[in-house]
Image (spheres, helix red, strand yellow):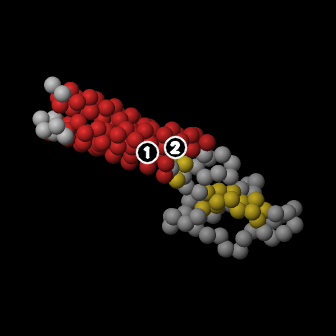
Amino acid sequence: MTYPQPAQQGPGFSARAGGTSAGSSTDGAWRPARVDPLPGTEFALVQLQVPPSTSGLAIGSMIAGIASILVSVLVLCFGAVGSGEGWGGLVAGAFALLAVLVGGGAVVLGLVAKRQVRRSGLDGRLRFVGRGQATAGISCGSAGAGIALLSLALSLVLQFS
């Protein structure tokens, strides 16, 4: 039994044996990954190739991790400058709390993003990428929280000595 072929085949369509087709479109349009003819009709089921998407959680984790490091630098600066005047420990403590919260958020987002990337790409699901960004977010978040706590300890030592 033969199946009718489509009347117009676009630039990204090339028929293969077995009812499947794959093509490469130069205009960035949707490309069929597979075409399965429906027996007894002139129609076919088309499964499209969907390009992978970068995980928003991974990007958010990386941004929060970098922000945590930047805020921890503020902890060090305010702790060193204000240690002789008495307000350094208080301001450094406020920024240290912010850095630890943002760093902890970056770690949590990074772990969730790694899980999302690992579980994606199964049949019928969108494939996410961004494992490296999630790892960078975890690293930067934990480093930012650690630097903030060490800077707070240094500013308290400087203030009370």
Query: Label 1 is placed on what type of residue?
Result: Ser
Examine the rendering and report whether any part of residue 126 can be seen.
yes
Q: Which mark is first along the chain, 2 or 1?
A: 1
Give the position of the N terminus as an image quadrant: bottom right
Q: Which mark is residue 113?
A: 2
In the image, residue 31 lies at what x, y percent? 60, 62
Q: Residues within 10 Å of mark 2 (few under 14, many from 20)?
A: many
Q: Residues within 10 Å of mark 1 (few under 14, many from 20)?
A: many
Examine the rendering and report whether any part of residue 69 can be seen.
no
In the image, residue 40 lies at what x, y percent? 87, 66
28 shown above or below 59: below
Q: Give the SS element for disc 1.
A: helix
Query: Label 2 is placed on what type of residue?
Result: Ala
6 shown above or below 136: below
Residue at (82% x, 63% y) in the render = 38
Of 18 and 133, the residue lying toward us: 133
In the picture, measured across the screen, residue 143 lies left or right of residue 133, that is left
In the image, residue 79 lies at what x, y percent? 20, 37
Check if mark 1's residue and mark 2's residue have beta carbons within 8 Å.
Answer: yes
Q: CA distance from mark 1 to mark 2?
A: 8 Å
Residue at (66% x, 46% y) in the render = 122
Q: Give the SS element for disc 2.
A: helix
Residue at (30% x, 35% y) in the render = 148
In the image, residue 57 lies at what x, y percent? 49, 48
Give the position of the C terminus as an image quadrant: top left
- Residue hosting label 1: 61
55 shown above or below 134: below
In the picture, measured across the screen, residue 15 lies left or right of residue 136, that is right
Of 100 and 109, the residue lying toward us: 100
Q: Which mark is residue 153?
A: none
Of 47 and 87, the residue lying toward us: 87
Residue at (68% x, 59% y) in the render = 47
